Amino acid sequence: MGFSENYIVLQLPGCIKIRKESENELKSSKINTLTCFIFPYSASEMTKNDSSGIRKEIVAYALQFVGNPYVWGGTSLTNGSDCSGFTQSVFRDKGITIPRTSKMQAAGGKDISLSHIKPADLLFYKKNGVVNHVAIYIGDSKVISAGSPSTGIRVLDYNYRKPYKAVSYID
């Protein structure tokens, strides 16, 4: 890669611009833009190579909403969401598209063993044989979940109910 051009490099949560100042000097500056171009890799290729970074980002982002309300059918992280609206909105903010309902989220992604779950994996719970709840695993045997109107978004032990299955949407 030569230094004769400007490059935009993703540096979460923003971008920097790098340009050649002289033969042996590069200069960077922060820029405000909604679009970042990454050379030579795309953002998806970068996250495939190191999924721990995006997993940490998802967990940190989700934890910001603890205490916010539960609203059945909601997808707002601040004004209220249900369990699958919460997971979908958190993942969407980090550039990962997942289905809307817990049943559809459980059917997508990659099934993983409950003994191999990692932060940002999704755990699913059943009632009467049907998937009816999803939570984000955050590590240390805990999940974050939009549970009910009385509890809102909260952190609790992952086995507060028996998890039915785990799915990862992160490579």
Image (spheres, grey):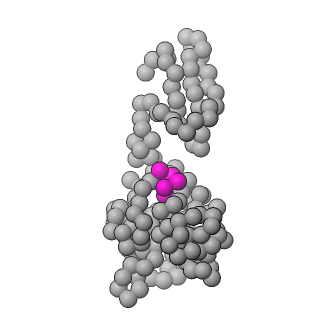
Query: Would you identify the image quadrant in which residue 62 lies?
Result: bottom right
Look at 42% across and 38% down and name the residue there: 42
Query: From this viewpoint, is residue 163 visible?
Result: no
Query: Would you identify the image quadrant in which residue 98 lies?
Result: bottom left
In the rendered image, the vertical position of residue 6 relative to residue 46, given as above or below: above
Look at 51% across and 25% down and name the residue there: 7
Look at 61% across and 25% down and name the residue there: 28
Seen from this angle, which residue lies furthest right? Answer: 67
Q: Is residue 149 left or right of residue 115?
A: right
Magenta stretch, overall SS: helix
Can you give x and y, in whole percent of width and height, for residue 51 in the image?
A: 45, 51
Can you give x and y, in whole percent of width and height, for residue 125 in the image?
A: 43, 79
Query: From this viewpoint, is residue 73 visible?
Result: yes
Q: Is residue 127 left or right of residue 34?
A: left
**Residue 131 is a magenta residue:** no
Can you give x and y, in whole percent of width and height, for residue 12 in the image?
A: 57, 42
Seen from this angle, which residue lies furthest bottom? Answer: 128
Q: Is residue 19 left or right of residue 96?
A: right
Instruction: Report the magenta residues as a range.
Output: 91-95
Query: Would you identify the image quadrant in which residue 34 lies?
Result: top right
In the rendered image, the vertical position of residue 5 relative to residue 37, given as above or below: above
**Residue 94 is a magenta residue:** yes
Considering depth in this image, is 29 or 141 the residue closer to the camera?
29
Work out which quarter of the rendered image holds the N terminus and state it.
top left
Total residue callouts: 0
Can you give x and y, in whole percent of width and height, for residue 157 in the image?
A: 55, 77
